Amino acid sequence: MATQTVSIIGVDIGVLLPTGKAQWGPADDPRDLVTFGREAERLGFSSLFVNDSLISPRIEALTMLAALASSTATVTLGTGALLPFLRRPLQAAQSLASIDLLAGGRLAVAVGAGFPGRFGRPFYTLSEVPWSRRFARLDETVALWRRVWGGAMSFQGEFYHFDNLPPATRPFREGGPPIWLGGATPAAMVRTGRLYDGWLPYPPDPADYASGLLRIHKAAADTGRATDAITPALFVTVLIDEDEDGGRRAMERYATATYGMSLNELEKIQAVVAGSFDRVRATINRYIDAGARHIVIRLGALDLRSQHQQLERVAALVPGWGHHEETAS
């Protein structure tokens, strides 16, 4: 039987794996995450993403991707987003190149510098990395990775200085995996246009996504880059439930367990949609109309059984997507 592709013409649909303990029930086995990834691939999702955080206990991002590299065959494997300051830069370059090799060139690396408050600054303290100049440090880390992957024997930057580098592990693809930036400030958009291969934000308003993408394209054009060299992606939290009130209550529990904040607060800072197939479809269509071409869906469920159910509902959603026709293979 042919496998239906969970995609829309010109748009990839991926899913975030629930690697955090906050998304597991008391009896859940985290080894089921590999099964979850294989199931998503079987259902036709085009990508599997993992996030990277110290907010709660979780499976470390690159460890999870290494497990998926050998247990999947076709899906893109991505980070949403990797926090490079948690790792030594050369060690991270080695790990990412190794995963890309094991996955046959299927890796995409979205990176971020963290956020103020409990979502960022304490992590820098734990990592013994200064909070100041964090964006410049991130850009230089990415530049270092690319140089190392290209075979450079030395690197001289503002933050990192290396002479006589040993031969590095080369990624599967020449130049290494594409690197996206997760961030939606005006400065982040300009940096995306100038330096990065993709954009993975989660703005709560599709209009902000559209205006941000225009800013990115302008920055790319000003630098002489082709705008189609930058993948416009979107990170969105989804819960499908035909009982609209029940869906809102379930997402409320998810927001509290994951972030310690109410759903109303979360909706002010992230793209979130809970409710019927029609509501979810209409919301994501607005982002697609705004220019998003790779949708990474985080499932708003708090145990692995419910995560599997939501995965199947999202897969079932696509054939009836509406004015965006689906493709099949």
Image (cartoon, rainbow, N blue to C red):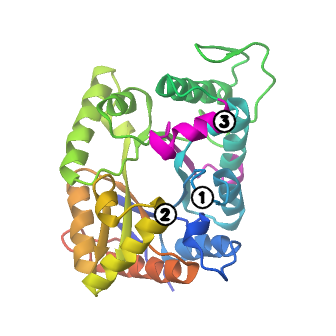
Q: Secondary structure at mark 2?
A: helix
- Sequence order check: which comes first, mark 3 or mark 1? 1
24 is higher (above) or lower (below) than 69: below
Q: Residue at the location (18% across, 70% down)? A: 323
Percent of width and height locating residue 114: 49, 40
How far apart marks 2 and 1 lie (CA) works out to 8 Å
Magenta region, residue range: 101-128
| Label placed on residue 258 | 2
- Sequence order check: which comes first, mark 2 or mark 1? 1
Q: Residue at the location (41% across, 77% down)? A: 315
Most foreground residue, 204 or 261: 261
Q: Are marks 2 and 1 in contact (CB under 8 Å)?
A: yes
Percent of width and height locating residue 24: 59, 74
Mark 1: amino acid: Ser
276 is higher (above) or lower (below) than 11: below
Q: Secondary structure at mark 1?
A: loop
Mark 3: amino acid: Ser
Q: Quadrant of residue 143?
A: top right
Answer whether residue 34 is visible to the viewer in this image. yes
Q: Are marks 3 and 2 in contact (CB under 8 Å)?
A: no
Mark 2: amino acid: Thr
104 is higher (above) or lower (below) than 299: above
Residue density around tag 3, few if under 14, some if 14–19, many if 20 or more, within 10 Å = few
Q: Where is mark 1, residue-wise?
A: 56
Q: Secondary structure at mark 3?
A: helix
Most foreground residue, 302 or 48: 302
Residue density around tag 1, few if under 14, some if 14–19, many if 20 or more, within 10 Å = few
Q: Where is mark 3, residue-wise?
A: 127
Percent of width and height locating residue 127: 66, 35
How far apart marks 3 and 1 lie (CA) works out to 16 Å
